[in-house]
Image: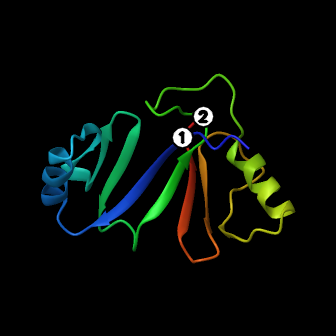
Amino acid sequence: MKLGAFSISLSVKDLQKSKDFYEKLGFSQMAGNMEHNYLIMKNGDHIIGLFKAMFDGNMLTFNPGWDQDAQNLESFDDVRDIQKKLKEQGIEIEKSADESTSGPEHIYLKDPDGNMILIDQHR
């Protein structure tokens, strides 16, 4: 199963303070903006999404179709195919993708410890 780019998405209280902190760890802004309450920070292949008031808790995020530089991959597993394989393996999907569509879509699921996982396809 090709899940694409990986990042951790953090729910933050103060976006500027979080940005300043992660910059001290060597991260720089890759995408997003303060006005939309989110920033994507990168250090080498490591990506952290900082999100203010967008969701509760932190989550693992995968982006099918993208590499770690948010560049399109030639081939990838569509989120709907990933969803189908997960369901076949008995994994409960919290928010399902509409299998009658194509293009951008996302699903949510939780691991056995309740950690949220977002599989978010942008193309």
Using the image, tell me which numbered label, if any, was put on residue 65: 2
Q: Residue furthest bottom?
A: 113
Q: CA distance from mark 2 to mark 1?
A: 8 Å
Q: Earlier in the sequence, mark 2 or mark 1?
A: 2
In the figure, 57 relative to 19: above or below? below
Colour scheme in the image? rainbow
Indicate which disc residue 122 carries. Answer: 1
Residue 108, percent from left and from top: 60, 64
Which is more foreground, mark 2 or mark 1? 2
Percent from the top left, x then y, of residue 4?
59, 39
Q: Residue at x 78, y 50 (%)?
A: 100
Residue 73 lies in quadrant: top right
**Which residue is drawn at the image coordinates 13% and 56% (left, top)?**
16
Q: Nearer the viewer, residue 104 or 113?
A: 113
* Residue 35 horizontal side relative to residue 76, left or right: left
Q: Secondary structure at mark 2?
A: loop
SS for tag 1? Answer: loop
C-beta proximity under 8 Å, tags 2 and 1: yes
Would residue 65 appear left or right of 98 to someone viewing this image?
left
